């Protein structure tokens, strides 16, 4: 059998694993994730795993990639500038499901057109207005198109997309290609986020393929989707939104493969996020409402994952209110000071030493910024461009900002991914405490010493020294991780109707975790094991298990579970369609080519089923599957009217599943 290569690009580390016969881990390797060009870290990790295994590149029959890139981009508000064409909707519809927030001021055109629920044209689409508007749009990386009831008739979305491609040659994301369900504003949101991600995912896949070819690997490249299934690289380029929660989904698949766990919470801590999901009977549940990430509820089919902006590289914030003060972590990732100093010691250490010698602590002590090479800076304001021009190499934030208003410019540059910020993180705290020694410990101690000088509400220093500051940060990691696990448990436990966050933070719950013994005896904890995954799980999670009073399972190779999950998954494609009854004796199949009417419900359902089977099989083949099996499910809704059963509508889903195609 061929060797299977799995690669995962996390926020801090890129992991690689070689598996033989889908049974045995042959070798694993880690390399630092190179944020400016993820392919460099991929190439290094793959080269190291080949060297560790002694395998020849030609032995690899398939490569699979899982990535947190799309998830992190949405969590951190990054991605390309896009434009939305909104057909048949009103201005007020932009305020539904966070669509206006997702646009972030990007261009939008509300265009006449759209269909009704039966797929009949409500109003002709105004392509002349579209053409005039396209002449005014510049500086966008792609377009999103959403038309009213496009899942019942996609004609207007298809016409608008064709006109945009002909005029601009830019990629276009049509909402009906991303979901077969109703709810136009939510589909529009999904299309906007998909368009925003296309450029960065395409760059990642293209560069990854180049690096694999450079190493002599010509096997097909697959990408993990948000539900844990695999798709071809070409399909991931077209629908990058489907790769949100790719890394976390791969970790759930990997956790099941590594431990054989049937019922457990799986918690995967990375550099940017902590991702938690529930395993029941050995299978991860699919979120019926669509993946939620970065504050947005999409229509992407994905594992029911609870993602929080908490990781080893989370930004540490000082909480100055109250007499004691404290810290909070996240939700954004920053480059750890110890890592930045490891990469550019001449730019970081002298600045930290000067700040340490100063008698007056500065607002931006221990904070740095650097430009990300090769990023798109189109559409910046004059002030933003002026701030960006000052960032050459690694710069202290205090040297970049000259006025308070320029802080907003720096944040916009950070939001766009044009610059990276560096500050104190839990990873730095672990260096100070001797739990990590991968990077520059001296820089970590200097930075945490500077943070410890910050004042509480009582005017006292936040901590006595760098070591006490580090313990405060690690304790906060334990607390926030425990809360995230409790929130997930309450969200999945049907016995509770209250908000999961409120339940997790309730005074009785917190006193129960502390085993309160007064006139009342209180005990509380998780009633199922937690599988801890991620490179830093062994550093943080034993204390979490103690806090929650549960078994903490830390499997061998748990640090590369995402990469393992990437190659033990299957290709699965689902296609869904509707049959409605617009009038008595008429049954309408809503297919990809538009509505088609039949005289009998069974005839309409059979035609739709045949269409869906053909499309699902074709999609599975395009996604890189072989040995494909089809499964069909019908959800028929009927009603009793005057003692007779009347057909209302039917939803038909076809699932095509197969093994990933392996080069032989």
Image (cartoon, grey):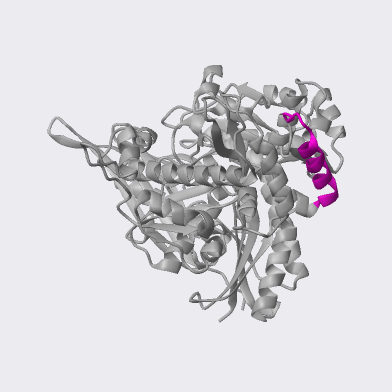
Relative side of 571 to 511, left or right: right
Q: Is residue 521 left or right of residue 417?
A: left
Residue range of the region highlighted in magenta in the rendering: 344-363
Q: Residue most toward the left?
A: 643
Q: Position of residue 102 (x, y in %)?
A: 59, 30
| On screen, residue 582 above or below 336 | above
| Number of numbered labels in the structure image | 0
356 part of magenta stretch: yes
Residue 320 in view in this figure: yes
- Quarter containing the C terminus: bottom right
Q: Residue at x 51, y 57 (%)?
A: 537
Q: From the top left corner, tell me how far across and down residue 161 is, in percent.
A: 64, 36
Looking at the image, which is closer to me, 390 or 582? 390
Q: Does residue 181 appear left or right of residue 337 in this picture?
A: left
> Considering only vertical position in the picture, is 567 above or below 550?
below
Residue 44 part of the magenta segment? no
Q: Residue at coordinates 73% horizontally, 64% vertically from top-left?
A: 43
**Residue 443 rendering spot, x and y as whole percentages:** 74, 49
Out of 136 and 407, give the one closest to the viewer: 407
Overall secondary structure of the magenta section: helix
Give coordinates of residue 574: x percent, y percent: 45, 53
Please tell me in which quadrant of the rendered image residue 509 appears.
Answer: top left
């Amino acid at each position: 059998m061929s060797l299977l290569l799995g690669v995962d690009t996390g926020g801090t580390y890129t992991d690689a694993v070689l598996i033989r016969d889908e049974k045995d881990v042959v070798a694993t390797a880690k390399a630092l994730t190179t944020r400016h060009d993820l392919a460099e870290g991929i190439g290094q990790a793959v080269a190291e795993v080949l060297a560790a295994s002694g395998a020849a590149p030609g032995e690899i029959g398939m490569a699979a990639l899982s990535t947190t890139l799309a998830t992190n981009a949405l969590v951190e508000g990054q991605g390309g500038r896009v434009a939305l064409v909104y057909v048949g909707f009103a201005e007020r519809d932009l305020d539904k499901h966070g669509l206006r927030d997702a646009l972030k001021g990007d261009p939008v055109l509300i265009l006449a057109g759209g269909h009704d629920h039966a797929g009949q044209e409500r109003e002709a689409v105004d392509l002349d207005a579209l053409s005039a508007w396209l002449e005014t749009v510049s500086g966008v990386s792609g377009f999103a198109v959403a038309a009213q009831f496009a899942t019942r008739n996609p004609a207007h979305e298809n016409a608008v997309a064709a006109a945009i491609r002909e005029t601009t040659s830019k990629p276009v994301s049509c909402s009906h290609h991303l979901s077969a369900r109703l709810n136009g504003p939510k589909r529009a949101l999904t299309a906007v986020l998909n368009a925003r991600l296309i450029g960065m995912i395409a760059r990642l896949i293209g560069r990854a393929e180049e690096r694999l070819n450079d190493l002599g690997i010509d096997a097909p490249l697959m990408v993990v989707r948000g539900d844990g299934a695999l798709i071809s690289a070409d399909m991931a380029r077209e629908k990058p939104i489907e790769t949100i929660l790719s890394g976390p989904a791969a970790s759930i698949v990997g956790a099941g493969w590594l431990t054989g766990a049937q019922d457990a919470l799986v918690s995967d801590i990375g550099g940017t996020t902590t991702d938690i999901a529930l395993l029941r009977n050995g299978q991860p549940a699919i979120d019926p409402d669509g993946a939620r990430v970065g504050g947005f509820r999409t229509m992407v089919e994905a594992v029911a994952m609870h993602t929080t902006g908490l990781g080893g590289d989370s930004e540490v914030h000082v909480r100055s209110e109250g007499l004691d003060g404290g810290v909070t972590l996240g939700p954004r990732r920053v480059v750890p000071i110890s890592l930045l100093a490891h990469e550019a010691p001449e730019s970081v250490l002298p600045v930290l030493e000067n700040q340490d010698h100063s008698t007056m602590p500065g607002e931006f002590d221990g904070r740095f910024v650097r430009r990300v090479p090769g990023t798109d800076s189109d559409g910046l304001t004059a002030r933003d461009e002026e701030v960006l021009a000052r960032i050459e190499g690694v710069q202290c934030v205090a040297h970049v900002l000259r006025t308070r208003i320029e802080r907003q410019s720096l944040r916009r540059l950070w939001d766009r991914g044009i610059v990276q910020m560096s500050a104190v993180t839990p990873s730095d705290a672990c260096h100070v405490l001797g739990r990590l020694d991968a990077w520059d410990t001296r820089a970590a101690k200097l930075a945490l010493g500077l943070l410890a000088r910050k004042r509480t509400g009582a005017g006292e220093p936040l901590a006595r020294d760098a070591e006490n500051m580090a313990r405060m940060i690690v304790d906060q990691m334990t607390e926030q991780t425990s809360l995230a696990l409790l929130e997930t448990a309450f969200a999945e436990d049907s016995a509770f109707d209250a908000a999961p966050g409120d339940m997790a933070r309730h005074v009785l719950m917190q006193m129960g975790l502390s085993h309160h013994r007064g006139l009342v005896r209180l005990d509380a904890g998780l009633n199922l094991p937690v599988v801890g995954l991620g490179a830093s799980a062994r550093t943080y999670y034993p204390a979490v298990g103690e806090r929650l009073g549960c078994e903490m399972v830390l499997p061998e190779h748990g640090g590369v579970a995402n990469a393992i999950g990437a190659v033990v998954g299957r290709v699965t494609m689902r296609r869904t369609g509707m049959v409605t009854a617009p009038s008595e004796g008429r049954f309408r199949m809503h297919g990809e080519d538009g509505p088609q009417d039949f005289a009998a419900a069974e005839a309409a359902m059979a035609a739709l089923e045949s269409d869906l089977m053909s499309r699902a099989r074709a999609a599975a083949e395009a996604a890189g599957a072989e040995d494909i099996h089809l499964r069909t499910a019908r959800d028929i809704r009927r009603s009793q009217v005057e003692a007779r059963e009347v057909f209302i509508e039917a939803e038909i889903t076809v699932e095509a599943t197969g093994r990933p195609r392996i080069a032989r």
